[in-house]
Amino acid sequence: MPKLAAFPKAFMRALVKDGTMTLREWVDLAAPLGVDGLEYYSGFLELVDPARWPAARREVERRGMVIPMLCCSPDFSHPDAAFRAAEIEKEKNWIRMAATLGAGYCRVLSGQRRPELTRAQGIDLVVQSIEACLPEAEKCGVTLIIENHYKDDFWLYPEFAQKMDVFCELVDRIRHPRFGVNYDPSNAFLAGDDPIELLRRVKHRVLTMHASDRTLISGTLEDLRNEEGGAEGYAKRLKHGTIGRGLNNYDAIFSELRSVGFDSWVSIEDGVDGMDQLVESVRFVRAKLKQHWPA
């Protein structure tokens, strides 16, 4: 059965910007959830100094959990070669961070969808950048996972490979044992795509998954697809919610993943309305995993 992790979605500013929460506080808060692991983010303030990485790992493991995934946001679509080279070096450092934390998976992104980039140019730049990181991943025993992402919190433009066709072409270009997909069904809605159709196209490459849910505040899914092309900006019709109460069909998602032998990590990106919401989401996803992967 897949293992369950949690990500501190509600506490990102406190852990990344304000420093008003420590990693120990997050670990202690998350421990009663009963999850198997905690997904970490490369931008946590306490991880700036590499000397603190081993202690961060021990903090999680002392509570009976592990750090399976490190969430990173490299920007590989920049037209300037020097900028891309710097981003590659950042990702290599994050790969080393992941290995020290005990994480087997390290996220990559494509980068920003800059207006001057053509599809072909962007894919070439991103493929070259990811492939430049793969030797370090091999050396460290870490696997790179690319997410069908929307937009990093600190980016000006949305994800270059946000749309399904671009994402699938990019994934298909990189055939390497240390590279695969982190599937996020909720992000497909923001791209105006069908999350199940996307999953069917990439399910043989899915190595990890982000679990969350979105609900429609008003209108219909067709309205959403017609709103700003379904891509630009966080659609006002959507909001985060408790998993199992939103648009995602987790029975269909887990059936597809089970059909290809998926047995890895599902990381919950939820709890923006508080820990009670996160508790309920963990309960729902755990029950669905047991249903679709019976002992």
Image (tube, rainbow, N blue to C red):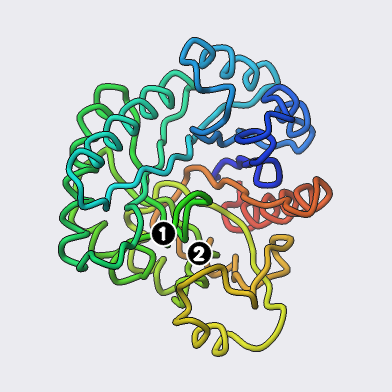
287 displayed left or right of 52: right
Residue under circle 2? Answer: 187
Residue under circle 1? Answer: 148
The residue at the point 29 percent across, 71 percent down is 165
Give the number of callouts.
2
14 displayed left or right of 154: right
Q: What amino acid is at disc 2? A: Asn
**In what element is the residue under mark 1?**
loop
Question: Residue 229 location in percent, x, y?
Answer: 44, 82
**In what element is the residue under mark 2?**
helix
Whether residue 258 is visible here, answered yes or no, is no
Whether residue 279 is visible here, answered yes or no, is yes
- Classify mark 2: residues with Cα within 10 Å, few (<14), some (14-19) or many (20+): many
User: Which quarter of the picture shows residue 201?
Assistant: bottom left
Question: Residue 181 location in percent, x, y?
Answer: 37, 51
Q: Quadrant of the N terminus?
A: top right
In the rendered view, would you say 71 is above or below 114? Answer: above
The residue at the point 55 percent across, 47 percent down is 266
Q: Which numbered tag is attached to residue 225?
A: none
Question: Residue 2 location in percent, x, y?
Answer: 54, 45
